[in-house]
Structures are given as C-alpha cells and as structure tokens.
Amino acid sequence: MNSKPTNAQSVQFLEVPEELAGQRIDNYLRTQLKGAPKTLIYRILRKGEVRVNKGRVKPEYRIQGGDIVRVPPIRLPEPNETPVVAQPLLERLEQAIVYEDKGLLVVNKPAGIAVHGGSGLSFGVIEAFRQLRPEAKELELVHRLDRDTSGLLMLAKKRSMLRHLHAALRGDGVDKRYWALVRGHWPTGTRKVHAPLLKNTLRSGERMVDVNPEGKEALTLFKVLRRFGRYATLVEASPVTGRTHQIRVHAKHAGHSIAGDAKYGDEGFDKEIRDLGGKRLFLHAVSLNLTLPDGTPLSLNAPVDETWEQVMGQLQDD
C-alpha cells in the first residue's frame, strides 16, 4: 500500500496514518499531491474519482486513520519542475515573520500574494517557505487568507501543531480579528451580521459567494473603531465562523462594502480610495490569540502596510 503518491499516471491507493486523522479530504489531497492545481483536486472529488474506503466523499469529509484513499491517474510535476521563488520575494517574506518556534511560523502576509500556488499561479506563501525552511519537511498552511487580504497567516512546521490548531479553529480556541475600511457610516457599537453564505463558481472559474438561505451558517461581529464623516468607517471584524469571503460578503450585506474589493465592492467608493493611493483591498488580519500545545498563551499583532497608513492619513475623522 502506497503511503505517498508518485508521478506515475496510474491509480494509487493511499492509507491514512493515524496522525493525519481529522483533516479534510481536500486538504489531505493537496498535501499528498504536491503541485496539483486546487481546481484539479476539487474536480476529481466532485466527479467521484477519489474514493475513500470504496465510497464517494465530499471535499469536507474528514479522513480517519486507516482510511484507504483511491487516487485516480493524474499528472504531477516532476521534482525538478518545482517552482523557484525569486530571492526578493523570499527576503520580503522572511522579513514579514512575526513569530517562529519549533512547531509554528506566523507571517504578516503582504496584500497581493497568494497563500499557495494554483489557478495560474506557480507559487505562493507556502511554496516560498518550503524553499526558505527546507528542513521543515512537514510545513503546511494552518488556514488561508484571500490573495488580496494582508495580515497574520499561520503555518505549522509539525503535524502535531497542525492537528492542535485545526482542533482549536473548529472550536473557539483561536480568536482572529481583522480591520476593514468600509464605505459609509457604520452604526454605533458592535453589530452582528448573521447571514448564511453559498459558494458559486462562475463559468470563468471565478468563485463568488452570496447571502442565500440555502447556504452555510455564517456569523461575523463588527465593531466601529474610527469614523471618517459619513464617507467611511474603520471597523474590527471578528468572524465566528470561517466561510469563504465571509467578512467581505457580510460587510456588503450590511450595506458597507470594503474598500478596494473588486468582487463585492462599490466602484465609486473604490475609485475615490484609489485616487488617494489605495490600490489594494482594505482587509487586514490584525491579531491572533491562541494557546500553544503546552498551554502557553500566544497573542500576536501585525501592523498594516504603508499604503494603508497613507490612505488613513488622508481621511478626515468624524
């Protein structure tokens, strides 16, 4: 029984080791099929070409120790086809590290850099850090940020850390806070946006999310931090659930789209912010609070970039 897939274009059967139990099948396949585009993994899952214990599974299925995963014939890049990340980006990401120990690495991801390769991108943050930390053989993303969102991103250097943080994320063991610059005058005080979200994929392959009663439950807490007249508001967003594009869609649903959001934003507002030099999505993962496996509390904060600071400096307080 194979434990790792090869580049041979034939059906393979992988036995899941006990230490990987609890991972989603899509994440497991992305780990095992290094270099395979995310779209390919979701396609073979959707078509039922991936089987677990001879049965079809959905992407959200969580694997168990001893599961037998059937992987269909696919073409993976040869080892010498691994993309080489340019030195300037490697240096930029190395300088963006805000915390590192034997099991965990946390980086203040710049806006515009994807967390992983795929969808036309040859590499992202995870590929860069595998190049920067070749000794960390088990390096994996703990969670994801949209390409245009900046801020704190966790990478586990050990399987034990990955399992610990995935369990914490499924419960309430990780407190994540975001800053967002939104259009208009957000109402005073903390506000809940509790609206189900449904993912759709357009013919172009672009992924869009809508508020839809048939979608998955989603809850975000918003708190006003600073006002700029009736024009804009800086809010803190705390996602209670972790749905795709959740903060962006919930902000739009509340009538206050995030500045610079090409998918869900307001064109007029976005243009005004761009005219101030704000050529980015104004969503930033600003803080993380969690407990490490040994019981030590960890509290991290990440500063916003120069573009964000410059735009904020030009806006007039209420």
Image (tube, rainbow, N blue to C red):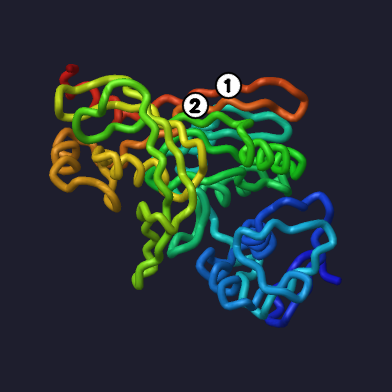
Determine contact: label 1, label 2, CB under 8 Å: yes
Q: Secondary structure at mark 1?
A: strand
Q: Say what amino acid the circle numbered 1 marks.
A: Ser
Q: Is residue 95 among what the camera can see?
A: no
The one of 89 and 126 positioned closer to us in this rendering? 126
Kind of residue at badge 2: Ser
The N terminus lies in which quarter of the figure?
bottom right
Indicate the quadrant where residue 251 lies. Answer: top left
Pointer 1: what residue?
299
Image height check: is 181 above or below 15? above
Residue 17 % position (x, y) = 83, 57
**CA separation, marks 1 and 2?**
7 Å
- Position of residue 34 relative to residue 162, above or below, is below
Q: Where's residue 187, x and y in %?
A: 26, 26
Image position of 62 with respect to 296: above or below: below
Above or below residue 234? Residue 47 is below
Q: Which residue shows up at 29% across the image and 39% down it?
A: 254
Mark identifier at residue 54: none
Quadrant (top left, top right, bottom left, bottom right) of the C terminus:
top left
> Is any atom of residue 296 visible in this view?
yes
Quadrant of the rendered image containing residue 68:
bottom right
Label 2 neighbour load within 10 Å: few <14, some 14-19, many 20+: some
Residue located at (65% from left, 56% from top) = 24
Where's residue 48, x and y in %?
62, 77
Residue at x 47% of width, y 38% of height:
109
Residue behind mark 2: 287
**Image quarter of residue 159:** top right
Q: State the residue at coordinates (31%, 36%).
A: 282
Image side of residue 40 versus residue 215, left or right: right
Tell me if mark 1 has few (under 14), some (14-19) or many (20+) residues whose alpha carbon lies within 10 angstroms of its own.
Answer: few
